[in-house]
Image (cartoon, helix red, strand yellow):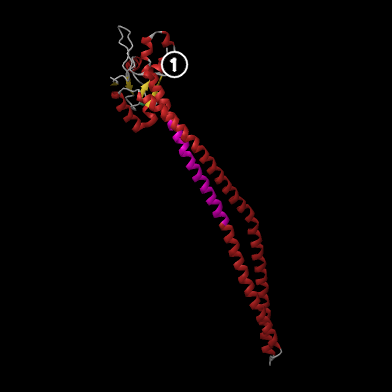
Amino acid sequence: MPRRFKPLFLSATIPTGTVVTHNPHAQRLAMATDAPSVALGKFAMSLNITAITLRTLHRIHQQLADLTDQISAGPRQITGRTKHLEGAEAKLTIVQNDIKKAKLLADQKQLQLRSAESKLVDLESKLNACKTNREYQTLRDQIAADRMATSVLEGEILEALELIDGIRKTLPVAEAEVASAKKLLADVKSRVNTEAATLDSHVATVKLELDGVERDLPADSRESYQRMIKSKGADAMAAVDGQSCGGCFQQITGNMVAELKMSRVVACRSCGRLLYLPESSSGS
Ligand SMILES: [Zn+2]
């Protein structure tokens, strides 16, 4: 047997066809629908009250869930853009550090070159003071070796300067990426702030509507409904989809459908959602 709840609203007594409902909102809803049931008279109308109310509540809770999603999407977008900016800034820092390192290396090599050159001048000045051919030759060899070393150093300095130029060329791209990431972040922040105000006012409107519908729930149904909403939110309800629960897609019994048609509150045995008949089936 399906789990039974008390009907949300006092409804028809079948033999007499008398409609008793203490629910002005539900009545309004029932009146508002132009489903064929209205044509069948008061009795058919009352049978639709539960479905219509659950459908309305479900729609409102889905709207609230959707609005909540949209509200929480804002900070997520800001976080995403902030990370993007941090990434661009990190890349720029790497480029800047690479330039610093390359400059330091070039400076060190230039210092080495200057000291090697002054050493050469010193050695050359000593050539005339040599007393033997052997001493002179040794000094000449030393000078030749040192010249070779300085020319290698000059080559390395040139390479270091070229390296700096090469890295510097990537600097504008890295800087542009940071600027663009900053702009994107500022844009998303301003958009999220603007949207947040609109979304908050939508939430307030929808909550007001929800309060109106919930106020009409009979006290005995309200408690179990609130419990379900608290634990499941919009997933506390599901439309019947053919012979299945529209929430978990498990099949429901013909008995359950029959109970639903009698305005009884039926919960899905598999997922516990409060079921209601969709507009097309409950209205006909
Ligand atoms: Zn289910």
The image quadrant that residue 69 belongs to is top left
Q: Is residue 284 left or right of residue 14?
A: right
The image quadrant that residue 241 belongs to is top left
> Residue at (48%, 42%) from the top-left corner?
76
The image quadrant that residue 245 belongs to is top left
> Residue at (43%, 31%) from the top-left corner?
64
Front in this rendered view, residue 256 or 152: 256
Q: Which residues are magenta?
A: 64-92
Q: Residue furthest bottom?
A: 131
Q: Residue furthest top?
A: 16
Instruction: Work out whether 272 lies above or below 137.
Output: above
> Residue at (60%, 62%) from the top-left corner?
99
Image coords of residue 185 (percent x, y)? 55, 46
Q: Main secondary structure of the magenta part?
A: helix
Q: Is residue 124 left or right of residue 22?
A: right
Q: Which residue is mark 1?
A: 32
Does residue 36 appear anywhere in the picture? yes
Instruction: Work out whether 227 lies above or below 22.
Output: below
